[in-house]
Amino acid sequence: MGRGLATALARRSETPYARAQRRRERVRDTFLTARDEWRLLLEILIEGETRAVCPAATELEVETYTDELGEPRGRLISILTDEGSADKDEEAVTERISELLDEWSIVTDPDTTEIAFTLAVDVHGSTSDDRS
């Protein structure tokens, strides 16, 4: 009996529970991969929007919380640069990234308190992606 036929017969004799368990593992792996990719893309967008206002930003201190309706939310605490914090830019950055932070809070670890920037900034202020 060929290997493919044996596999097909084994799957056919599987119980619905065993098939569901196997499918659950595949779906979970797909979900985790998609979640991680979504988080990475949001962090790139957050970094780009932040640096549009504050090019010297190196990371954000953030807070994740649950609002009164039970929805996850993200809040900007401070913008960090190599020289310290950029308090003067916080309001403008908050306006640009508040929706992105809320979306990010859905896919990040609830204990995460920072978003470290990894896009390289050249002398003209443009960025290139260093993430691989």
Image (tube, helix red, strand yellow):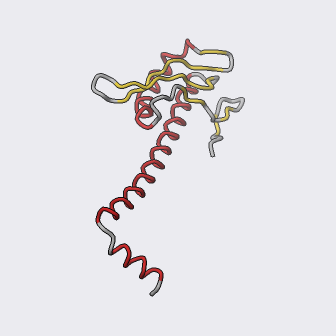
Query: Quadrant location of the N terminus?
Result: bottom left
Residue 19 to residue 96: above or below = below
At x 47% / y 81%, what residue is drawn? 3
Q: Nearer the viewer, residue 103 or 128?
A: 103
**Residue 105 sits in quarter:** top left
Residue 66, x across and y down, in percent: 35, 25
Above or below residue 84? Residue 23 is below
Q: Residue at x 52, y 25 (%)?
A: 113
Q: How many marks?
A: 0
Residue sitting at 47 percent across and 42 percent down?
A: 38
Front residue of 90 and 63: 63
- Residue furthest to the top in view is 88
Occupied quadrant, residue 101:
top left
Above or below 3: residue 64: above
Q: Position of residue 131 (x, y in %)?
A: 62, 42
Q: Nearer the viewer, residue 30 or 80?
A: 30
Asked whether, in this view, residue 86 is left or right of residue 8, the answer is right
Left or right, 15 with respect to 7, comes to left
State the residue at coordinates (67%, 35%). 120
Furthest-right residue in this view: 123
Coordinates of residue 98 in the picture (x, y in percent): 43, 25
